[in-house]
Image (tube, rainbow, N blue to C red):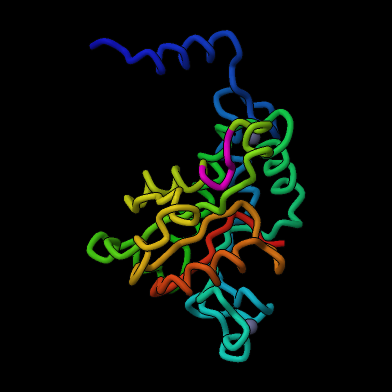
């Protein structure tokens, strides 16, 4: 069978510049499975607005008044040394776009470890969900060549079979009415742009808006 051009290019690049793990230098991938295990993905969920543990990831009752996000998923605390390094190599020089795959797989592992697995893991309940990456400015996009949040959303999409709506926040806001939205970003913080986008999506009558991040600061 004939190989598509992209995979031939990838094959040649692998020979010329073999990938090696950013942490242990083992050849084969940018982030090897052994080092992935070092990150100890969380099987617990917390309210996005305080540090209270939350059985199903929902915003706790005392935070609900001011909150825009219905809940949050994140795989690892951002203060983990290895996590910080990975995110910086993904978003800043050397800008390793391929890290989106192992980073997204940390989130998938998190979903699988949860005591109450998210409903979108079931095929029949996926239809009402959309993945929406947090946009980045045109200037930053030009410099970086890709939007990290979008790359993670694409990886999650191919794994979960939930469509990505990249232009929903700029042009297609009407399409989200009545839908459940998974807002994707690399890091979640209290001042995350997710807050503002969640507000916009709620105004456009999204049924639910959840944050999905690799790490929480
Ligand atoms: Zn390694
Ligand atoms: Zn709370």
Q: Nearer the viewer, residue 38 or 69?
A: 69
Residue 172 on image: x %, y % = 40, 55
- Magenta: main secondary structure equals helix
Q: Is residue 51 magenta?
A: no
Residue at point 26%, 10% (across, down): 2
Q: Is residue 147 magenta?
A: yes
Residue 122 on image: x %, y % = 29, 63
Residue 64 on image: x %, y % = 57, 86
- Whether 100 is drawn above or below 204: the answer is above
- Whether 217 is drawn above or below 92: the answer is below
Give the residue furthest to the front. 171
Q: Which residues are magenta?
A: 146-150
Residue 91 on image: x %, y % = 68, 39
Image quarter (top left, top right, bottom left or bottom right) of the N terminus: top left
- Whether 151 is drawn above or below 80: the answer is above
**2 sits to left or right of 191:** left
- Whether 199 is drawn above or below 184: the answer is below
Give the residue furthest to the bottom. 62
Image quarter (top left, top right, bottom left or bottom right) of the C terminus: bottom right
Q: Name the quarter showing ligand 2.
A: bottom right
Residue at point 59%, 22% (across, down): 19
Residue at point 63%, 58% (across, down): 76
Q: Nearer the viewer, residue 192 or 122?
A: 192
Q: Nearer the viewer, residue 166 or 159?
A: 166
**217 sits to left or right of 9:** right
Count of picture labels: 0
């Amino acid at each position: 069978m004939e190989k598509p051009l992209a995979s031939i290019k990838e094959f040649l690049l692998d020979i010329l510049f073999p990938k090696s793990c950013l942490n242990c230098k083992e050849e084969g991938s940018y982030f090897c499975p052994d080092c992935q295990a070092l990150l100890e993905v969380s099987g617990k969920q917390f309210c996005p607005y305080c540090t209270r543990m939350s059985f199903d990831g929902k915003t706790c009752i005392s935070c609900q008044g001011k909150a825009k996000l219905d809940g949050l998923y994140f795989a690892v605390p951002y203060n983990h040394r290895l996590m910080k390094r990975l995110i910086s190599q993904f978003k800043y020089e050397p800008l390793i776009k391929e890290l989106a795959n192992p980073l997204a797989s940390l989130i998938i592992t998190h979903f699988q470890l949860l005591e109450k697995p998210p409903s979108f893991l079931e095929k029949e309940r996926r239809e009402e969900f959309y993945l929406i990456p947090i946009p980045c400015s045109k200037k930053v996009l030009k410099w970086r060549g890709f939007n990290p949040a979008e790359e993670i959303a694409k990886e999650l999409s191919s794994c979960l079979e939930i469509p990505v709506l990249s232009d929903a926040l700029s042009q297609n806001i009407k399409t989200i009415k009545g839908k459940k939205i998974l807002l994707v970003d690399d890091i979640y913080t209290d001042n995350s742009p997710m807050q503002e986008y969640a507000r916009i999506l709620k105004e456009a009558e999204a049924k639910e808006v959840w944050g999905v991040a690799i790490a929480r600061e």
